[in-house]
Image (cartoon, rainbow, N blue to C red):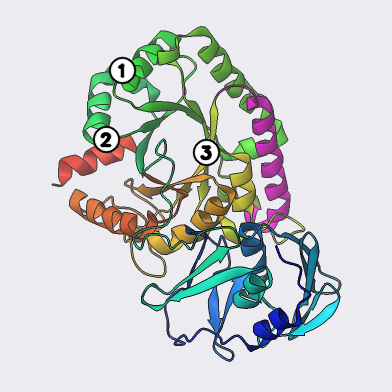
Amino acid sequence: MKKLQRVGLLTFLLSAAPFSFAQSAPQVQVAVNGEYVTFPDALPYVDPSTQRTMVPARFVAEKLGLGMQWNPQTSQVTLRKEPDTIQLTIGQDYALVNGKKVHFDAPAVLRSNRTMVPLRFISELFDARIEWLAERNLVAITTSGHASAVPPASVPPAPDSTWQHRRSTWLWDASLLYTQQEQIIQFASEHQLSAIYLQIDRDIPPTVYQQFIRKAQEKQIAVEALEGRPQWAFPASHGELKAFINWGRAYNASVAAQERFAGLHFDIEPYILPEWKSNRDKIVQSWMDTVRLIEKDMRSSGLTLTLDIPFWLHQVKVPGTDYSLSAWMLEKADAVVIMDYRNVALGNDGIIANAHPILREAATLKKQVIVAVETAPSAEGPHTSFHALPLQTMKTELQLAKEHLEHYASFAGFAIHDYNHWVRLKQGGS
């Protein structure tokens, strides 16, 4: 990176023409060195008063290789990349570049609790080239030392093939393994399932699980050991939780590789308890302690950790912070399943809109999200389940949702809740 001392460069920065956008333009996309940048909780936008593209400072800083610090007392952002330092203060129309005041025409602002900065100013200060592709509403940034690169118009980076567009379901009644193993495996194979979340009944002999998992693996279907209940969020139930983890570890250690569970899957859901409304922060803290315990006890087990969470969990903050609880859960798990229980893809309360926030977070954290829908009857209203609708309706809505969600690197496919009701839906529809 060049030192920022030349008057010519500073003059260029101050006189650079802004991008020409219509105020009604769709969402702005940003790519750095040919790779899309996914923003987890605050999207780029065009300031209508200056026509400058504003972006969240932290995520672009990471892409450009900059260190960043935020000082809430002074409302000041500091960006560093040796030997240079830039300081921007919220609301001011200048920055201090290595101590020298440099003016620009779009002040840094706070939006959605994130610092938004003018993209052109930051990128050009650090010797990066910007191209505006109007037909794609895309800002392409190429940093020093890279050849100019524009990502494909179709989609941003695809997820790892291990996770790509998986389908999965919950199987809550393990006793079905005594009588319906072949039917379950056949159904899973016909629907191209890559995972089954199987609730564990420890009274069932391990040989039954061994037989089922071996058949599933022959069809390239992973089986995750499923357990959980709301009370597991509290210390009084940690003994029961630890017993489940220990059982899973001991089982896997005692069987052949083709008979092992791929991971442990937790469905805890303390938010359905009455205390959630009266003392949410306390329950959240206890739930976090439980997840920490799970993470610690599963360490070096060779098992993946998957957590079921509601699609709205990004609205809940870690107590005492503005950090979302969903992002915190993503940090701890290998993947999450968001219970996005709606029966339409589009709309402000549809599958797509509800999935966006956590998919953005997961993309930044390089984690995976499975988007789940419901086929069982629901007391929360008919809009939350495909229960009373033809099977083809669910297929159509999920295909539409897939077309909108698959551009996220974090999107890992769909899960259908649950096996028993999905089978009935299939029998009643086309």
Sequence-wise first label, 2 or 3: 2
Q: Amino acid at mark 1?
A: Lys
- Residue 290 appears in view: yes
Q: What's the magenta region? A: 276-302
Residue at 37% across / 18% down in the picture?
213
Mark 2 vs mark 1, CA separation in Å = 14 Å
Residue 308 placed where, x, y %? 51, 42
Residue at 52% across / 13% down in the picture?
251
**Quick one: SS at disc 2?**
loop
Find out whether residue 295 is within the magenta segment: yes
Q: Toward which corner of the image does residue 333 lie, by quadrant?
A: top right
Residue 73 placed where, x, y %? 86, 71
**Quick one: SS at disc 1?**
helix
Mark 1 vs mark 3, CA separation in Å = 25 Å
Find out whether residue 393 is within the magenta segment: no
Looking at the image, residue 283 sits to the left or right of residue 263; the answer is right
Residue 166 placed where, x, y %? 36, 40
Residue at 29% across / 40% down in the picture?
421
Q: Toward which corner of the image does residue 93 lie, by quadrant?
A: bottom right
Q: Residue tagged by mark 3? A: 267
Work out whether 329 lies above or below 353.
Answer: above
Residue 382 placed where, x, y %? 33, 59
Residue at 28% across / 50% down in the picture?
387
Q: Residue tagged by mark 2? A: 192
Marks 2 and 1 close (CB-CB < 8 Å): no
Q: Nearer the viewer, mark 2 or mark 3?
A: 2
Sequence-wise first label, 1 or 3: 1
- In the image shown, does 28 or 187 lie closer to the viewer? 28
Q: Main secondary structure of the magenta part?
A: helix
Say which quadrant the N terminus sits in. bottom right
Q: Toward which corner of the image does residue 426 lie, by quadrant?
A: top left
Q: Residue tagged by mark 1? A: 215
